[in-house]
């Protein structure tokens, strides 16, 4: 996972899959790798 605060984007990398690009998501989760993980990104985009 790569957070780009300048462009307000998050790139999510998963083995065997294309990169997923999110534009200004309010939160991101750890999905299968860290099921309980959730990160609030709203403060980064301000």
Image: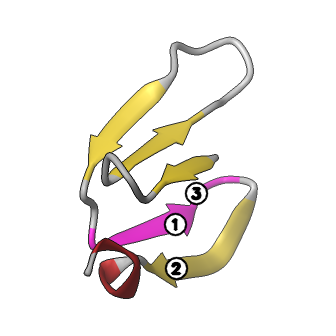
Residue at the location (58% across, 57% down)? 31
Q: Which quarter shows the C terminus?
A: bottom left
Report which residue position mark 3 lands on: 31
Dividing the picture into quarters, in which one does residue 30 lie?
bottom right
- CB-based contact (under 8 Å), mark 3 and mark 1: yes
Query: Up-down: is 30 above or below 14?
Result: below
Query: Up-down: is 31 above or below 36?
Result: above
Residue at the location (27% across, 73% down)? 26
Q: Does residue 33 appear left or right of residue 10 in this picture?
A: right
Residue at the location (65% across, 69% down)? 35
The picture places residue 5, in percent across and down from the top left corner, at 43, 59
- 3 vs 2, front mark: 2
The picture places residue 14, in percent across and down from the top left corner, at 66, 29
How far, Cα to Cα, is label 1 from label 2? 6 Å
SS assignment at label 3: loop
Report which residue position mark 2 lands on: 39
Name which of mark 1 and mark 2 comes first in the sequence.
1
Name which of mark 3 and mark 2 comes first in the sequence.
3
SS assignment at label 2: strand
Residues in magenta, as a range: 26-32
How far, Cα to Cα, is label 3 from label 1? 5 Å
Q: Does residue 33 appear left or right of residue 23 in this picture?
A: right
Q: Which mark is residue 2?
A: none
Q: Which mark is residue 29?
A: 1
Q: Residues within 10 Å of mark 1 (few under 14, many from 20)?
A: few
Query: Up-down: is 41 above or below 7?
Result: below
How many numbered discs, if any? 3
- CB-based contact (under 8 Å), mark 1 and mark 2: yes
How far, Cα to Cα, is label 3 from label 2? 11 Å
SS assignment at label 1: strand
Q: Is residue 4 magenta?
A: no
């Amino acid at each position: 996972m790569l957070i780009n605060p300048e462009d307000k984007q998050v790139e999510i990398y998963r083995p065997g899959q294309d990169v997923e690009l999110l534009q200004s998501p309010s939160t991101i989760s750890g999905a299968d790798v860290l099921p309980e993980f959730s990160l609030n990104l709203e403060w980064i985009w301000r």
